Structure formats: structure tokens, C-alpha cells
Image (cartoon, rainbow, N blue to C red):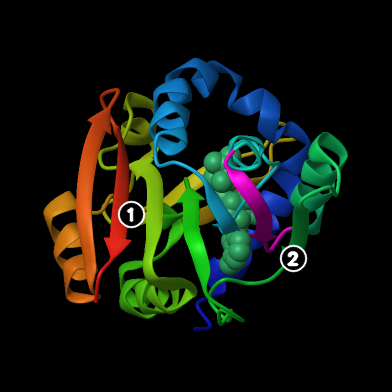
Amino acid sequence: MSDPILNEQIEYYRARAKEYDQSISSAVELFEAGKGMLLNLGNFDQILELACGTGFWTETLTKMGGEVTAVDAAPEMLQIARERLGEKGITYQQADLFKWEPEREYDLVFFANWLSHVPPSALETFLSRVQRAVRPDGYLAIVDQYAPSVADEIIAKDDFYAKRPLEDGREFTIVKAFYNLNLLEGKLNNLGFEVSTTKFTETFFFLSGKRVG
Ligand SMILES: C[S@@+](CC[C@H](N)C(=O)[O-])C[C@H]1O[C@@H](n2cnc3c(N)ncnc32)[C@H](O)[C@@H]1O
């Protein structure tokens, strides 16, 4: 799809890459519960991570047994992940997920803090691509927000866009959609996933699904 906001969203994250880790430092503790749930899924040979960013979750995925393919649109994000985690067991790929098609099937597909950046008009297409990336009997895991944080509420507009500032004062409009968990589970059930969702903290969920269909 060619929504100009989706390009602006990539530009925002390219520019934010160098300040990203610092900006999420207050959430690191909060994400420990999510990392624990991810590790509890077990070990996998081939793992795909979408929108890997600076590698915050990639690091956990490397402890889950196999080879990780980490995809992101922002070369600056991928570069930080590469510097942090190295190349051993990780293949980095630059791709725009709104144009991406999976090249193969994986045992586990994971993405954190990405689904809320997929606009509702692109959700079905994105989720069906994800389904095609998960092998039969393979797993999907998602971490994201089901509700806005207090900070999100302050800057929220009446739609699924949000304004995000950078340290240098520039401001970007990006997508921020809080998907209803029943709706999301229903869509994934229709795509052949058996799904289980756990809320952690006041705004985040961990969803895991096995592809049975
Ligand atoms: C909120 S960050 C999440 C990063 C990481 N998953 C984490 O939780 O720390 C969103 C990520 O999506 C990436 N991104 C934005 N638009 C994208 C697109 N169209 N295709 C692929 N990645 C994109 C950004 O570069 C950024 O790394």
C-alpha cells in the first residue's frame, strides 16, 4: 500500500534509531515479563522477527535455539542491532513490511511493538503474509499494546495516527492503532491459528498462536 504516512513512519524510525534505546529504557523492566513468556514457548530452529529495531527482542530470540532472521525497514536500526548482537546466528534483512512477502516458512514468527504500527486497512494483508511465513504446526508470537498509555492518550488524535517528536524537535506522524484483542484473535483463528493471549502491565499483551490450519 502507498499511504504517505507509512513512508513518514519509516523516516521517523530511521531518524529515531540513535535515540531509540535510551527512549525505551524506562520500559525495559516492564518488558521482562514479555521476554519470559517468549522464552517459555521453547526452542525453534528457524525464527523470523519482523520490525526488529535495535535488537531488543532479537537478543532473547537468539537464546531460543536456532537461526534468527531479523527484518526492519530502517538501515540505521539494523546497524545498531548488528553492532549489539553481531552476525552469528542472525541474518539481517532490510525490507518494507507493507511490500514484503515471506521467502520461506519459519518455525516461529515474532514481532514486538510493530502491530500497532500497521493501519487497519493493511491488517488483513499483513496477517495473511504472516500466516504464510509460519510453517504448519509452527508458532506466531506478538507483543504490543492493547490500550494507550497515559503518554499516548495525551498526544492521541481521534484516529489511528499519532504525532511523535524527536529530541531535535522534528515531529512525525505515524500509525498507532490499538487493536481489540477479541478482533485480533478472531482474525488469527480464521487464518488457522489456535491463539492464547495474556495481558501484562496495564497496556501490553503477549499473544502466542500455533498454526493448526
Ligand atoms: C516501535 S519500533 C519496535 C522495534 C522493536 N521490535 C522493539 O520492540 O524494540 C518499530 C520498528 O518498525 C520499523 N518499521 C517502521 N516501518 C516499517 C516498515 N514499513 N517495514 C518494516 N519495518 C518498519 C522501525 O524501523 C522500527 O524499528
Q: Residue drawn 33% across and 57% down?
A: 160
Residue 49: name its quadrant: bottom right
Q: Is residue 53 left or right of residue 129?
A: right
Q: Residue drawn 85% across and 49% down?
A: 87
Q: Position of residue 100 (x, y in %)?
A: 58, 79
Label 2 beta carbon less than 8 Å to ligand 1:
no
- Seen in the picture, residue 121 relative to 160 is either above or below; the reply is below
Magenta stretch in the rendered image: 64-74
Quadrant (top left, top right, bottom left, bottom right) of the C terminus: bottom left
The tally of labels here is 2
Q: Residue drawn 56% across and 82% down?
A: 101
- Seen in the picture, residue 151 relative to 99 is either above or below; the reply is above
- Seen in the picture, residue 183 relative to 87 is either above or below; the reply is below
| Number of residues whose C-alpha sits closer than 10 Å to that of mark 2, classed few (under 14), some (14–19) or many (20 or more) | some
Query: Is 72 colored magenta in this rendering?
Result: yes
| Three-letter residue code for mark 2 | Gln
| Three-letter residue code for mark 1 | Ala
The secondary structure that most of the magenta stretch takes on is strand
- Of 160 and 25, the residue lying toward us: 25
Q: Is residue 58 left or right of residue 178?
A: right
- Disc assigned to residue 93: 2
| Number of residues whose C-alpha sits closer than 10 Å to that of mark 1, classed few (under 14), some (14–19) or many (20 or more) | many
Q: Position of residue 207 (x, y in %)?
A: 30, 47
Q: Is residue 133 left or right of residue 100?
A: left
- Disc assigned to residue 177: 1
Spatial CA distance of label 1 from label 2 is 25 Å
- Seen in the picture, residue 102 relative to 88 is either above or below; the reply is below
- Of 14 and 153, the residue lying toward us: 14
* Residue 94 appears in the picture as rendered: yes
